[in-house]
Image: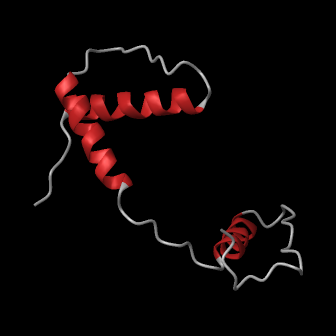
Amino acid sequence: MTRKLNEADRAAVDMIFDKLNARADGSTGYVAMSAAVDEARMGAVENVLKLLNELPTPEPSADLAVRTLQRIAAAAPNVAIPTMPQYLNSNQPMA
């Protein structure tokens, strides 16, 4: 079953992420609303995000940085891309 967000749900999701971004910027977390957002929908969005936060976070692949730099180099061949320092092992996880 595929569920799609309606306009009210989208507004609640946008409001939650706007608040998160405002807090991350170091501001008060106050976000001016352009339209009213139902508190019940805001609570439902927060509950879903809390559940998603509980999911295990997969470890990124060991060569993620190398592949990312290669894709950047391929997309912009005239831009100088730094190479990985020799003391770093590209087969070892970075995090």
Query: Residue at the spot x=59%, y=21% of the render?
Result: 27
Q: Is residue 36 above or below residue 56?
A: above
When asked about the image quadrant of residue 91, the answer is bottom right
Q: Residue 93: horizontal and vertical position, in percent?
A: 66, 77
Q: Is residue 22 above or below residue 56?
A: above
Query: Residue at the spot x=86%, y=73% of the render?
Result: 83
Q: Residue 49: horizontal and vertical position, in percent?
A: 33, 46
Nearer to me, 7 or 27: 27
Which quarter of the figure is the C terminus placed in? bottom right
When asked about the image quadrant of residue 81, the answer is bottom right
Q: Which color scheme did the rendering employ for the protein?
A: secondary structure
Which quarter of the figure is the N terminus placed in? bottom left
In the orientation shown, which residue stands out farthest toward the left? 1
Q: Residue 72: horizontal and vertical position, in percent?
A: 71, 65
Q: Residue 44: horizontal and vertical position, in percent?
A: 21, 37
Query: Residue at the spot x=18%, y=36% of the render?
Result: 6
